[in-house]
Amino acid sequence: MYDVAIIGCGVIGAATAYELSRYDLKIAVLEKENDVADGTTKANSAIVHAGYDPEPGTAMARLNVLGNAMIEEIAKKLKVPYQKCGSLVLGFNEDDLHVIYRLYRQGMVNGVPGIRVLNARETLEMEPNLSKEIKGALYAPSGAIVSPWELCIAMADTAKRNGADFFLNSKVDRIERTGTAYRLFCGDQVVEAARVVNAAGLHSDDVHNLVAEKPEFRIIPSKGQYYLLDKSQGNLVSKVIFQCPSKVGKGVLVSPTVHGNLIVGPDAVGVENDDDVSTTQSGLDFVRETAVRSVPGINFRESIRNFAGVRAQSERSDFIIEESKSARGFINLAGIKSPGLTSAPAIALDCIKLLERTGVFLKEKEDFIDERRKVSFKSLSPEEKAALIEKNPLYGRVICRCETITEGEIVDAIHSPITPRTVDAVKKRCNAGMGRCQGGFCGPRVQEILARELGLPLEEVLLNKKGTYILTGETKKGGVQQ
């Protein structure tokens, strides 16, 4: 019997597992996909929001500002790419300036540090490549950028090193109550737990309805599409550039990434299918035409990838962080829309308080591990590189030429606590395939290394999700063999 079972391991589930693993508790994490960070967490703007946008008095406002500070600390301890670059909200007319002053007042009430309103000259001195049409801007120095999937993986890995059990490919399809506890069915696999945390993101309403007497909330998926541009565009701006928010979100942003690229997007379109991550020409046209209003010089011919992510919005205007009304000890962390990534560590703290109120006894571990080692070969000095190669020659073989990722780093990733078993899972952990060619050169090499290290036939190494086979047969024998 587990003390706590967490359903879903995006950044909310991972943060909850990480914070819970500080205590003497038996923890299970159930994830329906073959890797963590595989839903909304891997396809978003990668922004650590400052906290001026949420309405004062809401959970979003409180947890945004707290989460902003927590991510900076966690990223430092767990070696997660993070950069406190600041953010700007641009105003192009008098109406926008009214919005900017409203955001400024909200930011002051929410406790956002260092926030201030700039005139056009001050804004352009900070960011000379912005449109000359701007009239002013809101500047928030605590705005930042992070690698969202690496933050999730780092917290999940650390939770596992501190004793949490992870069950991948484990979709919860039935829940039974057993007195004061729960029995979670994942096909033929059964996990029993005294308490359950529902962090199932886009499917959190479905998971809740497996146990509740009646629905208490509904997830309304909203898709956002993006451009990811080559590093040649990465220095066009140094801060996260927003336009004034609208009813459907924070609008199209232009931002550097922690990997040196430029990200542009998203739009916001309602979708019927939670898993619809397709892109459309009309959506991308909207993103491009809106973004050049902020930064006219973006060269979209340098785009290396388009992608879409789906946000788990609910019909409520705030995060849903509460115990189910009809299922004692069943905690819902749902409707975690933006700034959900930023708020994730703070949401985990709220969750732990809720669990404690249901009777979970919290005793801190004396031997909690709260650091992570990770080699980034290209960031080392020549002397450090030479010493590392002498110790392990695998660091002397560059596999991903675009990102300068060595075989040693890929092998490190494969043998990390939560074993990646697909080419994209390796990509999320060490950046192999993240560059201009998007894995065109290194993909087959990563596949070979995965097969070798995990003892798998080459044909069984997938690109990402179940069924995404890369090799299906030998062409010399006539193609696919049935």
Image (tube, grey):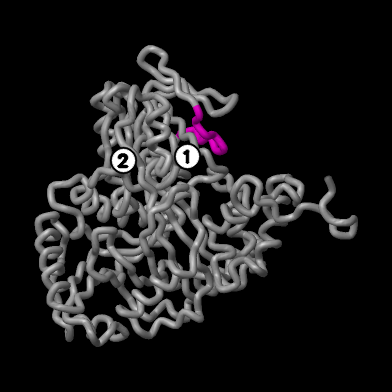
Answer with mark 1 or mark 2, whichever residue precedes in sequence: 1
Callout 2 amino acid: Ala
> Would residue 337 be seen by someone viewing this image from the given angle?
yes
Q: Picture coordinates of residue 19 (x, y %)? A: 34, 39
In this rendered view, identify the residue nearer to me: 181 or 394.
181
Q: Quadrant of residue 362?
A: top left
Q: Which residues are magenta?
A: 163-173
Q: Picture coordinates of residue 296 (x, y %)? A: 35, 84
Residue to which mark 2 is pinned: 348
Callout 1 amino acid: Arg
In this rendered view, identify the residue nearer to me: 129 or 134.
134
Q: Quadrant of residue 34?
A: top right
Q: Picture coordinates of residue 211 (x, y %)? A: 39, 24
CB of mark 1 within 8 Å of CB of mark 2?
A: no
Q: Is residue 465 above or below residue 170?
A: below
Q: Residues within 10 Å of mark 2 (few under 14, many from 20)?
A: many
Where disc 2 sits, the SS reads helix
> Would residue 1 be seen by someone viewing this image from the given angle?
no
Q: Residues within 10 Å of mark 1 (few under 14, many from 20)?
A: some
- In the drawing, what numbered circle is on residue 161? 1
Where disc 1 sits, the SS reads helix
Write the residue at 30% across / 22% down: 326
In this rendered view, identify the residue nearer to me: 152 or 265.
265
Write the residue at 36% across / 39% down: 16
Prevailing SS of the magenta stretch: loop
Quarter holding the C terminus?
top right
Q: Picture coordinates of residue 337 (x, y %)? A: 32, 50
